[in-house]
């Protein structure tokens, strides 16, 4: 495959990536939809690179309530060393969203000095730093949404962020409406009722995962 299309391996030739895979003793895993890729708290200090497909970082609290913490697309990275240790008995899992392929590497290989002083090793560390920076930005965005008090305010905040990221009023949700309820940490039925009210008020139009954000045009706010 062409590794250069993935953010972690940008600027590194495919042959050099293959050499790293052998040197670092990386392993591959293939997963079907709904299959657990890994569970935080049970991992062995590995970092996962999603080569193909998509996955979701999902938290289950002690009562079994499910919250989507993060959506991982092809090229994304995940791992307990890059996140947190679950507290209060919570379970955090990375779940495949379809047919996916993951490359696993030991976190220590990223941090230790390369004995051969390989230029591509340094590039890998640089790319990982950029990915962690982007990961931090995404977490800040999530906090911005969850800090809103009502369901409508959460939806408005999330849609505005998606609109800004897309650069237009129409955008595609990265997941289903059911998953959106998990993402904003609210009851699905209550969220669907609020979305219906927002449609009737002319604030938003939704067809499947396609969203047309109308509120700013209606109200005149920017």
Image (spheres, rainbow, N blue to C red):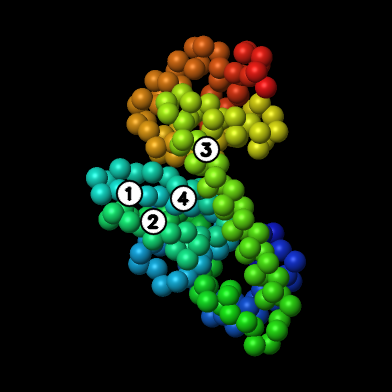
Residue to which mark 2 is pinned: 93
- Cα distance, mark 1 to mark 2? 8 Å
- Cα distance, mark 1 to mark 4? 12 Å
Of residues 15 and 24, the one nearer the viewer is 24
* Residue 172 in the image: above or below residue 88: above
Which of pointers 1 and 3 indicates the residue nearer the eye? 3
Which of pointers 2 and 3 indicates the residue nearer the eye? 3
**What's the mark number on residue 60?**
1
Q: Residue at x 48, y 52 (%)?
A: 55
Which element is circle 3 on?
A: helix
Of residues 162 and 113, the one nearer the viewer is 113
Q: How many neighbours does mark 3 have within 10 angstroms: few (below 14), some (14-19), or many (20 or more)? A: some
Mark 4 near mark 2, Cβ–Cβ under 8 Å?
no
Q: How many neighbours does mark 2 have within 10 angstroms: few (below 14), some (14-19), or many (20 or more)? A: many
- Cα distance, mark 4 to mark 3? 19 Å
Mark 1 near mark 2, Cβ–Cβ under 8 Å?
yes
**What's the mark number on residue 144?**
3
Which element is circle 1 on?
A: strand
């Amino acid at each position: 495959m062409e590794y250069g299309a993935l953010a972690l391996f940008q600027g590194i030739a495919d042959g050099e990536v293959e050499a790293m895979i052998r040197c670092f003793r990386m392993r591959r895993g293939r997963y079907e939809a709904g299959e657990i890729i890994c569970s935080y708290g049970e991992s062995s200090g590995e970092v996962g690179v999603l080569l193909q497909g998509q996955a979701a970082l999902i938290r289950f609290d002690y009562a079994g309530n499910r919250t989507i913490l993060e959506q991982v697309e092809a090229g994304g990275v995940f791992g307990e060393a890059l996140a947190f240790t679950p507290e209060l008995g919570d379970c955090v899992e990375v779940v495949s969203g379809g047919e996916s392929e993951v490359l696993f590497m030991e976190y220590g290989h990223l941090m230790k000095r390369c004995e051969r002083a390989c230029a591509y090793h340094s590039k890998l560390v640089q790319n990982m730093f950029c990915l962690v920076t982007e990961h931090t930005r995404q977490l800040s965005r999530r906090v911005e949404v969850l800090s809103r008090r009502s369901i409508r305010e959460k939806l408005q905040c999330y849609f505005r962020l998606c609109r800004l990221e897309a650069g237009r009023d129409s955008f595609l949700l990265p997941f289903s409406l059911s998953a959106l309820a998990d993402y904003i940490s609210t009851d699905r039925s209550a969220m669907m009722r609020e979305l219906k009210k927002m449609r009737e008020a002319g604030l938003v139009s939704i067809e499947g995962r396609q969203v047309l954000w109308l509120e700013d045009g209606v109200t005149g706010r920017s």
